[in-house]
Image (cartoon, helix red, strand yellow):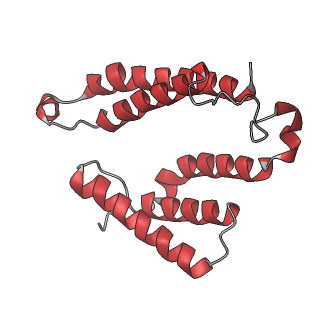
Amino acid sequence: MALDRWIALVFLILCLVYGYTAFFVMDAGLPPFMQRNPIWPSSFPKILACLGVVVSLVVLLGFEKSDKGHVASDINYRRLHEYKLGQALTLIGAMVAYALLLRPIGFLAATFLFLVVGGLTLGERRYVLLAAIAAFATGVVWYLVQQVLGIFLSPLPSFLPHIL
């Protein structure tokens, strides 16, 4: 089996576990007044899990492949060292650091730093534009989650009082 199908299989298993958690575990702790809302905190994870299952099944079953046979752009695990593994591992490390720093330094700082580090890792060198876009995206996401969805995210570090 090709490497892309192995990755799709792992992705399918992750999406199934994520979907099981979203459908059966997350909603169990909801208070009764929140169960009457049209959008629950588990709504977006449910959509993500379903889309992930569909995409991984498309790759796993080979529906995205053309009939032309082997294409040079396919992932070859024997030449894995020739790919940009450093960038991929740096992004994975940034994601782990983001998850670990979310509570101690707050959502705004953690998200801004993650977006800046991710942009720098991917090769963006227009620093002012990168910082402006990261700040704008961080603010928009925080506003949507906090104000529109009503999900509390601590915007500031935990050692500061709750100003916002």
Residue appearing at x 88%, y 32% in the figure: 78
> From what the image shows, is residue 33 above or below residue 133?
above
Q: Residue furthest bottom?
A: 128
Give how far across and how far down residue 127 sits, in percent.
61, 78
Residue appearing at x 24%, y 49% in the figure: 149
Horizontal relation, residue 95 to residue 27: left or right: right
> From what the image shows, is residue 3 above or below residue 75?
above
Residue appearing at x 62%, y 78% in the figure: 126
The quadrant the C terminus occupies is bottom left
> From what the image shows, is residue 142 above or below residue 29?
below
> From what the image shows, is residue 43 above or below residue 100?
above
Residue 160 visible from this viewpoint: no
Give how far across and how far down residue 151 sits, in percent.
28, 48
Q: Nearer the viewer, residue 62 or 7?
A: 62
Q: Nearer the viewer, residue 9 or 148?
A: 9
Residue 43 visible from this viewpoint: yes
Q: Nearer the viewer, residue 96 or 115?
A: 115
Answer with the quarter of the image where residue 125 lies: bottom right
Give the total of numbered labels: 0
Give how far across and how far down residue 144 sits, in percent.
29, 57
Q: Residue furthest front?
A: 68
The quadrant the N terminus occupies is top right
Give how far across and how far down residue 61 sits, in percent.
58, 19
Residue appearing at x 87%, y 46% in the figure: 82
Q: Nearer the viewer, residue 3 or 22?
A: 3
